Amino acid sequence: MTDVLFYHLQHKPLEAVLPTLLEKSLERGWRAVVQATSAERLAALDDHLWTFSDESFLPHATDKEPDAPAQPVVLTLSDRNPNAAAIRFLVEGAPIPPEIGGYERVVLLFDGNDEAALAAARADWKSVKAAGHDATYWQQDARGRWEKKA
């Protein structure tokens, strides 16, 4: 079964959290795909992953680029898995793909200060659990560290 992780963002924004999670995924030897719901968010993430740190960058592409299948991280608006990723990150309310069994993990990152995002995450939690997947819920503490809550 695919592990599904819910990350409740409260004290750090997506732009501060996602690069670290992607780096950890690459350290495991996993390819990653990041799904957003708007071209604007995708473009912003694309720019951010090149410049988020003075010491490093995350090699990546959007799924529109011809070399996307060879990239360790691919940004997309679709539910396809363009680079045979082991982990899928869903941001900006991107829906859980119909078939997640091909992933080691699926990670939903949602804004804990947005009531609509919280309600959508609760509904996703119920559907993931009903489908028999292992689900864990992580929430940021005041220092921005992750605490497992469920």
Image (cartoon, rainbow, N blue to C red):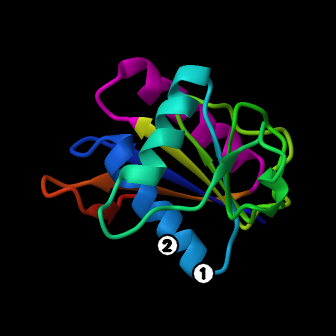
Q: In the drawing, does residue 24 fall left or right of residue 133?
A: left
Q: CA distance from mark 2 to mark 1?
A: 6 Å
Q: In the drawing, does residue 136 fall left or right of residue 113?
A: right
Q: Amino acid at mark 1?
A: Arg
Count every numbered label the image shows and give the total: 2
Label placed on residue 28: 1
Label placed on residue 24: 2
Q: Quadrant of the N terminus?
A: bottom right
Q: Amino acid at mark 2?
A: Lys
Residue 8 sits above or below residue 31 on the image:
above
Q: In the drawing, does residue 38 fall left or right of residue 76?
A: left
Q: In the drawing, does residue 109 fall left or right of residue 54?
A: right
Position in image of residue 147 (x %, y %): 30, 63
Position in image of residue 111 (x %, y %): 37, 33
Looking at the rendering, the stretch of residues picked out in magenta corresponds to: 111-132
Residue located at (84% from left, 61% from top): 84
Foreground pick, 23 / 139: 23
Q: Principal SS element in the magenta part?
A: helix
Position in image of residue 3 (x %, y %): 66, 63
